[in-house]
């Protein structure tokens, strides 16, 4: 698996090549959206989305914070992926 920093660099480079006539801000925005989609981890993607990053570098900072958080959380509470939320209204 390619390190996220390399993916980010590749996304930025490819975005600039694909859209050479648009401004820097537009390229950064496109690269940001592509990088978030490339995360390939729904929890990480949601974590990054919630932080509302403005740059690719900010996405990298957030993602680097997430992995230790996720590992520490799983150690404290265990993996609860099998837990389901019970609703008061069974028809919902």
Image (cartoon, rainbow, N blue to C red):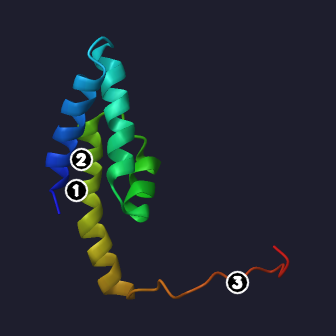
At mark 3, the secondary structure is: loop
What's the distance in space between the residues labelled 1 and 2, CA to CA? 6 Å
Give the residue pinned by disc 2.
60
- Residue 75 in picture, x, y percent from top left: 30, 85
> Along the polypeptide, which appears first: circle 3 or circle 1?
1
Q: Which residue is mark 1?
A: 64
Residue located at (36% from left, 41% from top) = 34
Give residue 86's mark: 3
Q: Quadrant of residue 54?
A: top left
Q: How many marks?
A: 3
> How far apart, in angstroms, are the residues tagged by discs 2 and 3?
35 Å
Marks 3 and 1 sit apart, C-alpha to C-alpha, by 33 Å
Measuring 45% from the left and 56% from the top, which residue is drawn there? 46
Q: Residue furthest front?
A: 18
Q: Position of residue 22 (x, y in %)?
A: 33, 13
- Answer with mark 2 or mark 3, whichever residue precedes in sequence: 2
- Give residue 57's position: percent from left, percent from top: 23, 38
């Amino acid at each position: 698996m390619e390190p996220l920093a390399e993916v980010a660099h590749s996304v930025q480079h490819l975005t600039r090549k694909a859209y050479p006539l648009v401004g820097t801000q537009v390229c950064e925005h496109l690269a940001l959206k592509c990088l978030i989609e490339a995360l390939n981890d729904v929890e990480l993607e949601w974590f990054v989305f919630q932080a509302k990053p403005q740059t690719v570098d900010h996405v990298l900072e957030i993602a680097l914070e997430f992995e230790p958080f996720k590992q520490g959380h799983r150690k404290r509470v265990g993996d609860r992926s099998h837990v389901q939320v019970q609703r008061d209204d069974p028809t919902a």
